[in-house]
Image (cartoon, coloured by chain):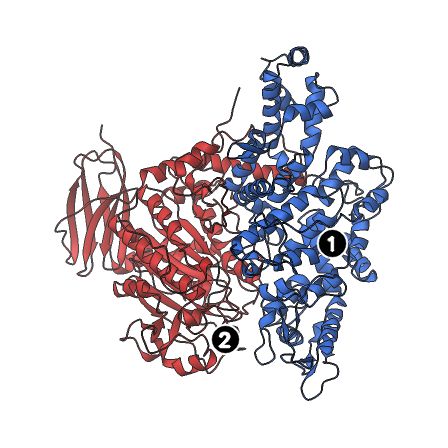
Chain colours: A red, B blue
């Protein structure tokens, strides 16, 4: 019997990872030769990990404005993080000016450690104009990449990927782009049925192969003709999801199996007092899978993880101790999971490819309520993690004496933050920024990305150049480059999975034109990347090694 | 245009099946047969028959329920009660008759949800919440919403019990306006959502101050007979936490004010708090936006997720007027909608915008619908309570794998497929959810079991023998099965695929001969295997995911 090769899903899928965006379909543009060309020339291997704090995070108990502590305390005495004692807030950086003096929640020691390593930043007071107090509408706004009165049917990430990878998903996977462009991780919140008489344990990400085997026999041939009706639309949609699953399942499993985590132990339990439902770290297992997929060579550009529990109208802290409780546990989980994730990535030499940040649909009211909680508010900080960022505190502490309807007003539009991702991190051309509808935020984008790939104009201004020949080569590669000034310089070669082949020793870093040579030695034929790091700038060239 | 005019004549099988798929928790063959000879009006009259009120669930340790005046077994942990309650609900769905009761209860839950883990510390609250939903399942939406304002579970879930005069707690007041009643319109100015404003949230929150939960279950709603929350009061019956100031509402509510009656010394009686709640509910329900909002939700549940400007004009607006004219009796709307030409794809001129088969089944509909259709029965709860719970526990697990955490939506707005634009019901379909939906067919045929004991199993062969018109003829047989399981008409190529490639194994099987062999020898090996393969294939098709 003719059976379709169907539904070979990987572990990823078993853990609730959806190859779709949250509410934001990645609908495809028609294929177009110009766009194809751009996609093929896209050398950027940068990855974005977005952590959605679902429900509206209380920014003021995450990042405490030290210079306004009195005001802060007066507005929320029953939940305020103390300024003294064993569990006082952690001063992030005492060298910052007064209006940027912030304290982290005492359970964010890992974030503080990352800051001290240069791997953590805070962007204060992020929101959008006319913040809508609705969870749903507000999440839609953040995901869609519009303003309060926009109603797009696509999301900013979807539009970016559409532009960069024309024809997705129909024309993919392809030999060049074998992986899903974006993966949404499940919440990993298991509500398993605990009773004495055993029922089968839930499928878990720890056992991907079993899941693969379990379901790779499911499914039948799709219908040949689809009726032109609403029902037909749904059949087509379902078939598309099937096709997508078929296309990627085996690949994801292979990547997952090819990858491995380093010996870093990911955190699990919150060590202090919190409700039972908040004790386990919901983020760490998701990040562990992402790390393993990256080590296996996945080319996915964006990962989204979602953590619930932030809608803290009541009991966000435990009675008698405002430093513990469900909100504290969530902050501990994010901060400790991020530290483990980057330790893991650094051990494998992958950290510089990954930028992570949190976001939430809104912050919370400055004044707490009598139920040890906070109501829906407006602006809140975003937390940025990564080894390729400019650490620091962006923006100033909110002026708690001058609130807007009891809320912290917006200092940065969230699109100023995401524009830096698209332009500086993904190195998207201007046209892509227009497609994403971020073009008016380019000039006001926030400069937290350190490893920028410079645009042609910017390169011209800095008078940097990098040229590799012969290309293709069969053994030796000559690398010519020009520097206008003395820089911190490194020239390193990578494969497409981000693994280093080695750096050029003693490459001159003085002004002028230089030429160095790299010998591929025993390296097998394939496509490789030459990267030149000149201070904060990065130039990349693709070279092909073709041994006859 | 989309027409609310009633269809005429008897329904016939196809329309009866469509009606029952949408209005009940899944038809059985005998239901379809019975309804097919009814007119649409007679069918509706049958749908509004009350389903018997199910007995409370029993604790397997004690053999009794844990509803006051009974007490929960103190040795159990709260999660157990949550699970037993969910199982109870599922078994009620499974056992419900061909009527609207459980469908409406599910609709209400998706629209006015409560998250179990927020209330699980008291194991009666979830059951009382479900009882209130059930009480109003064929009834009055306004009364339901009013009851929900003071329901113990809801007072906890949206923090209403924490809302006191000195420190207002807006959570419930905001969701009351945004989710349950007028809904949000365009934001025309900061804090002005057309249908309500931030001022209304604040004023309504004041109206709602001073309510608390009653876990002694001594406060009983006189209408429903079900325990409710109560006004926080002192020994003299004076409300202690209610805000008695004047509440000013915005132009969205004609700048009305609401005042606490009979205020003495900045306090009032508990009766005044009830009266004031009634006044606020009256005010909000006098807005046509409340009627439109709930009618749109009904449309999405019963017809299709997309509300076009045509649907808004032709369907939503007239039905909203009907609803207001009938003082929010939802049945007055369903009586029109479920008999309408639009519901049965008989709009004139005809369009391809059909509603038959156009909704993706929820995991609840997929799993329980199949169990109901094949009339499968699990262990008898009277004689084998543990096994009964074990089965429903496994079914809950399956639904979870398909993307439905029953009674545990991630969001206070409920489950994504019922409200999340733009895709609505398509959120039920992801790579992994879909695979688990397909897998369910196989599990059903292989059977659910526990420790070697079978709990539930779909025996395809006996079902086919009992119900197929002519099982010996492969074309007639496949036609039957397709009609049973697929909500839309399929074309010849698809039909031939199921018949020739699946049942007849690409011509390798002479079905009529094999069937005759089975009849004469009782050796069922081959026909059983092929029928199971056919049913499994049908249930693993994209078409089967729809209803």
Image quadrant of residue B240?
bottom right
The 10 Å Cα crowd at callout 2, few under 14, some 14 to 19, many 20 or more, is many
Which of the numbered marks, if any, corresponds to residue A308?
none
Residue A321 locus on image (x, y percent): 41, 73
Image quadrant of residue B47?
top right
Residue B251 locus on image (x, y percent): 71, 75
Foreground pick, A417 / B44: B44
Left/right placement of residue A456 relative to residue A501 reads right
Disc 2 element: loop
Image height check: is A155 above or below B250?
above
Foreground pick, A238 / A27: A238
Camera-nearest label, 1 or 2: 1
Disc 1 element: loop
- At 62% from the left and 54% from the top, the residue drawn is B419
Foreground pick, B18 / A145: B18
Q: Which residue is mark 2?
A: A368
Residue A417 locus on image (x, y percent): 41, 63
Q: Which residue is mark 1?
A: B137
Q: Are marks 1 and 2 in contact (CB under 8 Å)?
A: no
- Given the current orientation, which residue lies at the most extreme bottom position? B265
Left/right placement of residue B168 relative to residue A493 reads right
Residue A347 locus on image (x, y percent): 25, 50
- Given the current orientation, which residue lies at the most extreme front position? B62
Image height check: is B129 above or below B534?
below
Say which chain tag 2 marks. Answer: A
Q: Are marks 1 and 2 on the same chain?
A: no
The answer to whether one can see residue B486 in this image is: no
Image quadrant of residue B184?
bottom right
Foreground pick, B341 / B518: B518
- At 47% from the left and 31% from the top, the residue drawn is A216
Left/right placement of residue A43 relative to residue A222 reads left
The answer to whether one can see residue B61 in this image is: yes
């Amino acid at each position: 019997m003719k059976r379709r090769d169907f539904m070979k899903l990987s572990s990823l899928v078993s853990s609730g990872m959806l190859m779709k965006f949250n509410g934001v379909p990645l609908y495809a543009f028609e294929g177009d030769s110009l766009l194809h060309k751009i996609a093929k020339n896209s050398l950027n291997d940068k990855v974005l990990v977005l952590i959605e704090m679902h429900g509206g995070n209380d920014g003021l108990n995450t990042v405490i404005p030290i210079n306004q502590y009195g005001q802060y305390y007066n507005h929320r005495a029953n939940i305020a993080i103390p300024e003294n004692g064993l569990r006082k807030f952690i001063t992030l950086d005492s060298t910052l000016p007064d209006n940027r003096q912030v304290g982290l929640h005492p359970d964010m020691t890992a974030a503080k450690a990352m800051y001290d390593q240069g791997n953590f930043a805070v962007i204060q007071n992020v929101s959008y104009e006319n913040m809508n107090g609705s969870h749903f509408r507000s999440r839609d706004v953040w995901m869609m990449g519009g303003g309060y009165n926009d109603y797009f049917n696509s999301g900013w990430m979807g539009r970016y990927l559409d532009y960069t990878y024309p024809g997705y998903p129909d024309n993919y996977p392809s030999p060049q782009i074998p992986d899903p462009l974006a993966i949404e991780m499940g919440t990993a919140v298991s509500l398993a049925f605990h009773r004495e008489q055993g029922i089968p344990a839930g499928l878990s990400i720890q056992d991907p192969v079993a899941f693969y085997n379990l379901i790779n026999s499911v499914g039948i041939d799709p219908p040949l003709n689809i009726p032109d009706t609403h029902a037909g639309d749904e059949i087509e949609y379902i078939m598309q999801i099937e096709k997508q699953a078929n296309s990627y399942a085996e690949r994801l499993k292979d990547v997952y199996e090819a990858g491995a985590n380093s010996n870093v132990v990911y955190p699990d339990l919150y060590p202090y007092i919190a409700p039972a439902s908040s004790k386990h770290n919901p983020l760490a297992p998701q990040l562990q899978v992402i790390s393993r997929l990256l080590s296996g060579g996945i080319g996915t550009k964006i990962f989204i993880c979602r953590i619930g529990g932030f809608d803290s109208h009541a009991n966000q802290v435990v009675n008698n101790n405002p430093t513990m409780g469900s909100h504290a546990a969530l902050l501990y989980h994010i901060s400790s999971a991020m530290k483990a994730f980057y330790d893991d990535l650094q051990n494998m030499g992958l950290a510089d490819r990954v930028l992570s940040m949190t976001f939430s649909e809104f912050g919370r009211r400055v004044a707490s309520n009598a139920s040890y909680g906070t109501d829906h508010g407006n602006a809140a900080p975003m937390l940025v993690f990564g080894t390729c960022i400019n650490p620091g505190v962006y923006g100033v502490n909110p002026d708690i004496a001058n609130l807007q309807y009891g809320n912290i007003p917006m200092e940065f539009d969230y699109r100023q933050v995401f524009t830096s991702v698209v332009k500086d991190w993904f190195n998207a051309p201007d046209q892509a920024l227009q497609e994403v509808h971020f073009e008016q935020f380019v000039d006001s984008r926030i400069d937290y990305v350190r490893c920028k790939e410079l645009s042609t104009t910017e390169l011209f201004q800095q008078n940097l150049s990098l040229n590799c020949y012969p290309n293709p080569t069969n053994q030796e590669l000559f690398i010519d480059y020009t520097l206008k000034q003395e820089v911190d310089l490194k020239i390193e070669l990578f494969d497409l999975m981000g693994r280093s082949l080695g750096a050029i020793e003693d490459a001159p870093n003085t002004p002028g034109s230089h030429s160095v040579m790299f010998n591929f030695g025993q390296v097998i034929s394939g496509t490789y990347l030459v990267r030149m790091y000149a201070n904060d700038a990065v130039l990349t060239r693709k070279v092909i090694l073709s041994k006859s | 245009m989309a027409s609310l005019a009633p269809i005429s004549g008897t329904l016939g099988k196809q329309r009866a099946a469509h009606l029952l798929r949408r209005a009940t928790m899944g038809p059985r063959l005998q239901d379809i047969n019975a309804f097919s000879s009814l007119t649409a009006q007679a069918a509706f009259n049958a749908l509004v028959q009350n389903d018997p009120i199910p007995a409370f669930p029993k604790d397997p340790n004690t053999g009794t329920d844990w509803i006051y005046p009974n007490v929960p077994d103190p040795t159990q942990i709260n999660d157990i009660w949550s699970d037993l309650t969910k199982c109870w609900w599922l078994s009620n769905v499974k056992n419900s008759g061909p009527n609207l009761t459980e469908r409406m209860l599910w609709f209400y839950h998706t629209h006015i949800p409560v998250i179990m883990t927020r209330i699980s510390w008291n194991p009666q609250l979830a059951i009382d919440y479900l009882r209130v939903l059930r009480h109003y399942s064929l009834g009055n939406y306004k009364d339901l919403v009013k009851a929900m304002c003071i329901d113990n579970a809801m007072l906890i879930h949206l923090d209403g019990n924490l809302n006191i005069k000195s420190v207002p707690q807006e959570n419930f007041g905001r969701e009351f306006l945004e989710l349950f009643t007028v809904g949000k319109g365009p934001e025309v100015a900061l804090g002005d959502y057309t249908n309500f404003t931030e001022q209304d949230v604040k004023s309504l929150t004041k109206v709602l101050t001073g309510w608390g939960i009653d876990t002694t279950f001594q406060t009983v709603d006189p209408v429903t007979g079900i325990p409710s929350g109560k006004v926080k009061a002192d020994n003299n019956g004076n409300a202690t936490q209610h805000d008695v100031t004047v509440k000013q509402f915005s132009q969205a509510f004609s700048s009305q004010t609401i005042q606490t009656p009979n205020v003495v010394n900045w306090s009032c009686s508990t009766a005044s708090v009830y009266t004031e709640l009634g006044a606020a509910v009256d005010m909000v329900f006098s807005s046509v936006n409340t009627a439109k909002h709930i009618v749109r939700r009904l449309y999405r549940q019963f017809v299709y997720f997309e509300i076009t400007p045509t649907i808004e004009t032709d369907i939503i607006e007239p039905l909203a007027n009907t609803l207001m004219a009938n003082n929010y009796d939802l049945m007055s709307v369903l009586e029109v909608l479920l008999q309408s030409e639009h519901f049965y794809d008989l709009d004139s001129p005809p369009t391809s915008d059909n509603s038959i088969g156009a909704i993706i089944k929820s995991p609840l509909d997929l799993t329980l619908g199949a169990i109901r259709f094949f009339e499968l029965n699990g262990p008898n709860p009277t004689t084998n309570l543990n096994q009964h719970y074990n089965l429903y526990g496994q079914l809950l697990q399956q639904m979870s794998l398909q993307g439905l955490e029953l009674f545990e939506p991630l969001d206070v707005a409920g489950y994504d497929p019922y409200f999340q634009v733009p895709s609505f019901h398509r959120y039920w379909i992801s790579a992994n959810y879909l695979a688990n939906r397909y897998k369910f067919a196989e599990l059903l045929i292989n059977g659910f079991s526990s420790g070697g004991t079978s709990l539930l199993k779909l025996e395809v062969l006996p079902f086919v023998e009992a119900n197929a018109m002519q099982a010996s003829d492969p074309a007639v047989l496949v036609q039957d099965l397709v009609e049973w399981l697929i909500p839309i008409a399929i074309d010849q190529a698809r039909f031939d695929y199921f018949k020739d490639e699946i049942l007849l194994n690409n011509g390798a099987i002479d079905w009529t001969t094999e069937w005759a062999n089975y009849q004469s020898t009782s050796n069922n090996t081959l026909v059983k295997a092929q029928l199971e393969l056919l049913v499994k294939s049908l249930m693993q098709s994209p078409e089967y995911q729809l209803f």
